[in-house]
Image: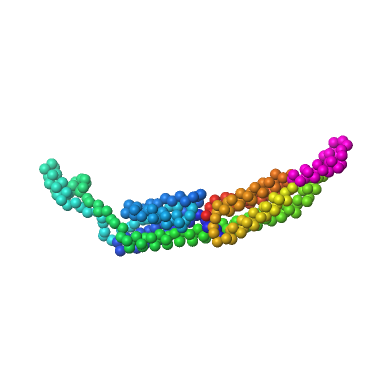
């Protein structure tokens, strides 16, 4: 099972005096990179929110936001009446003007307005926690849907690499014979006498240096392990990344040892498929 790190989740909580909207957006990242935006009243809960998100989202560049919209006549700002009256009385001794004009000036002075700090109600916080969990669930469903697209692409490309590997295996005897013929022809063109037994020993040694039997076996095992890991219940993009590195190592070794143009063309095709897998793995959770 594969989860993408790209996702979006949203949940809305309607309270008697306000509407609270919770949004989560995530992109790919090597680790969890969490950016939280929220009104100051909820800042005391930020650590709890971060822990909840870290436990459930694991990795990704995550933007978390809480938006609050007042839906009733409810305000935490009040006029400091005694202070405003005192300002107006002082202004009357300085300037001439109507009471309305003096009031407009007075409310601009310091301490003319009092802002009462709100406290989070326990029931409200529990409701917000529930909606955060709902937003996380929505984001993870989005990640799962995106992950299915990645999974299908990975499986298709791993099958393609396996099919090309079968062509490499079928071509290998032809490659070995081709190497043998080239070496024999090269020695004969020297028109020098040589010990045939010694030459045969050196030829066997040379061909053994370019033997790719182990690489073919290991590559097939790595491809099987990649598919097995995709089909497991856990999504582990990092693990698949490590396996893809091992796949690349075996493909590169086959390419360097092949010494045979038709086989090297097949190696290029396998590399191309693997590079596309690596690119997509950057977005796998």
Residue 12 appearing in the image? no
Residue 53 point in image, percent of width and height: 43, 56
Res 91 → quadrant = top left
Closer to the camera, 104 or 176?
A: 176
Residue 201 appearing in the image? yes
The vertical placement of 40 against 201, above or below, is below
The vertical placement of 195 against 75, above or below, is above
Q: Is residue 199 left or right of residue 107?
A: right
Closer to the camera, 101 or 160?
A: 160
Where does the N terminus fall, quadrant-wise? bottom right
The magenta segment is 182-210
Q: Residue at x 48, y 55 (%)?
A: 58
Residue 194 sits inside the magenta stretch: yes
Residue 106 point in image, percent of width and height: 18, 47
Residue 176 point in image, percent of width and height: 78, 48
Residue 77 point in image, percent of width and height: 24, 53
Farthest residue, direction left: 93
Q: Is residue 270 left or right of residue 80?
A: right
């Amino acid at each position: 099972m594969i989860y993408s790190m790209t996702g979006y989740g949203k949940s809305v909580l309607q309270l008697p005096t306000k509407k609270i909207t919770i949004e989560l957006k995530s992109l790919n990242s090597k680790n969890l990179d969490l950016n939280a935006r929220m009104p100051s009243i909820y800042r005391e809960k930020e650590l709890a929110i971060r822990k909840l998100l870290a436990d459930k989202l694991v990795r990704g560049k995550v933007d978390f936001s809480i938006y609050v919209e007042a839906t009733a006549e409810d305000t935490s700002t009040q006029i400091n009446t005694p202070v405003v009256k005192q300002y107006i009385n002082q202004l009357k001794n300085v300037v001439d003007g109507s009471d309305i004009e003096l009031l407009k000036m007075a409310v601009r002075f310091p301490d003319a307005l009092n802002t009462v700090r709100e406290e989070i109600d326990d029931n409200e916080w529990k409701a917000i926690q529930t909606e955060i969990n709902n937003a996380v669930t929505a984001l993870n469903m989005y990640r799962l849907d995106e992950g299915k697209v990645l999974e299908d692409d990975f499986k298709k490309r791993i099958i393609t690499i396996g099919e090309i590997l079968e062509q490499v295996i079928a071509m290998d005897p032809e490659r070995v014979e081709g190497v043998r013929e080239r070496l024999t022809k090269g020695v004969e063109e020297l028109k020098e006498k040589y010990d045939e037994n010694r030459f045969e020993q050196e030829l066997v040694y040379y061909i053994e240096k370019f033997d790719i039997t182990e690489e073919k076996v290991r590559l097939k095992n790595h491809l099987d392990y990649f598919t097995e890991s995709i089909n497991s219940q856990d999504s582990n993009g990092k693990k698949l990344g490590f396996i893809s590195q091992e796949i690349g190592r075996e493909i590169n070794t086959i390419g360097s040892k092949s010494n045979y143009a038709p086989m090297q063309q097949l190696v290029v095709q396998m590399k191309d498929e693997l590079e596309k897998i690596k690119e997509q793995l950057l977005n796998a959770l």
